[in-house]
Image (tube, rainbow, N blue to C red):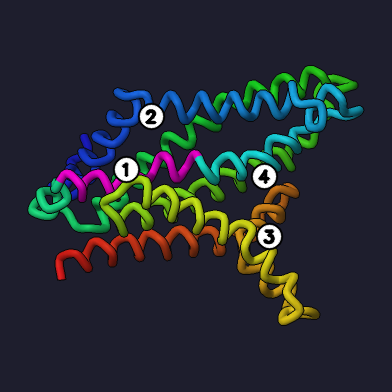
């Protein structure tokens, strides 16, 4: 039997409390339902992107459009994580317990990741559908699809870390949502836009693009998992989790 330390038990309690908050209210169901509904419309209904109008089986539409949906859904999930605690004054109560700021943040972060995983899991039905529609049946690049799923989860995990940091900056959930969406947009598309400026013409253009999430997400989506891409995503996640921790500590100062 595994015995948890008091601090680990407190972090697990925070994790379970967040998961319960997601699914005891409409938040979790709305996030999952909205994601699946939008992706279903994009893949099977809208004429410009429907796979029924393509001559080959692909899940390209899912992986191209999911980051755009996550740009709004993930900030909506994370905006309440720390902002609500600050608004209600319970963040001070958490600080009195034998748990560090990092453990508080990790408990809430892991709960957000679990909700994201639950949102992605039903999309395997889309994979099964496209698999059956292939000619011949199963004519899919499963390696590239697996890499794309992995990249999409890393992208969502990065957005969740950004959202948690934004939530630590304000007690207002709307402010946290707007700030999170802006930072996620900047990380995903901003560097591509900056790279097109005359200032970065030449070799500088590729360097600036490599600083953005889109570059590394596109790389993993090809089915080849490069350690440089993994290091990039883990660095972004670690950076914003540490920034969120410093933001909480700043309130103590």
- Which secondary structure lies at badge 4? helix
Residue mark closest to the camera, 4 vs 1: 1
Residue 12 shown left or right of residue 243 in the figure: left
Quarter of the image for residue 135 reads top right
Task: Mark 4 or mark 1: name the one nearer the start of the chain.
Answer: 1
The answer to whether marks 3 and 2 mark residues whose Cβ atoms lie closer than 8 Å is no
Instruction: Tell me the SS state at disc 2.
Output: helix
| Image position, residue 156 (x, y; %) | 52, 46
Q: Mark 2, residues whose alpha carbon is within 10 Å: few (<14), some, or many (≥20)?
A: some
Q: Which residue is mark 1?
A: 80
- Range of magenta residues: 73-88
Disc nearer the start of the sequence (3/1): 1
Which of the image's four quarters has the C terminus?
A: bottom left
Say which of 127 and 213 sits in front: 213
Q: Are marks 3 and 1 in contact (CB under 8 Å)?
A: no
Asked if residue 10 is among those painted magenta in the image, a careful observer would answer no
Crowdedness near tag 4: few (<14), some (14–19) or many (≥20) residues, C-alpha within 10 Å: many
**Discs 2/4, front:** 2
- Mark 3–mark 4 Cα distance, whole angstroms, equals 14 Å
Residue placed under numbered mark 2 in the picture: 27
Residue at the spot 71% in from the left edge and 71% down from the top edge: 195
Gap between marks 1 and 2 measured at Cα: 11 Å
Q: Residue at x 35, y 65 (%)?
A: 243
Question: How many angstroms separate mark 3 from mark 2 (CA)?
Answer: 31 Å
Residue 124 lies in quadrant: top right
Percent position (x, y) of residue 169? 31, 59
Circle 4 is placed at which residue position?
Answer: 147
The residues bearing labels 3 and 1 have C-alpha atoms spaced at a distance of: 29 Å
* Residue to which mark 3 is pinned: 215
């Amino acid at each position: 039997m595994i015995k948890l330390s008091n601090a680990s038990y407190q972090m697990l309690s925070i994790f379970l409390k967040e998961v319960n908050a997601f699914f005891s209210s409409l938040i979790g169901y709305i996030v999952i339902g909205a994601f699946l509904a939008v992706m279903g419309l994009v893949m099977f209904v809208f004429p410009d992107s429907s796979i029924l109008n393509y001559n080959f089986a692909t899940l390209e539409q899912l992986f191209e459009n999911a980051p755009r949906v996550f740009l709004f859904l993930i900030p909506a999930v994370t905006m309440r994580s720390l902002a609500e605690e600050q608004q209600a004054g319970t963040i001070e109560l958490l600080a009195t317990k034998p748990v560090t700021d990092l453990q508080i943040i990790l408990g809430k972060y892991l709960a957000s990741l679990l909700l994201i995983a639950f949102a992605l899991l039903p999309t395997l039905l889309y994979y099964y559908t496209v698999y059956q529609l292939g000619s011949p049946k199963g004519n899919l690049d499963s390696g590239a699809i697996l890499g794309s799923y992995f990249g999409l989860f890393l992208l969502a995990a990065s957005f969740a870390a950004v959202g948690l940091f934004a939530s630590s900056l304000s007690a207002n959930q709307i402010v946290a949502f707007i700030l999170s969406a802006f930072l996620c947009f900047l990380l995903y598309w901003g560097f591509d836009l900056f790279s097109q400026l005359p200032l970065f013409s030449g070799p500088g253009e590729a360097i600036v693009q490599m600083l953005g999430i889109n570059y590394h997400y596109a790389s993993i989506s090809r089915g080849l998992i490069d350690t440089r891409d993994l290091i990039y995503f883990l660095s972004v996640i670690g950076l914003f989790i540490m920034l969120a921790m410093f933001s909480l500590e700043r309130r103590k100062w």
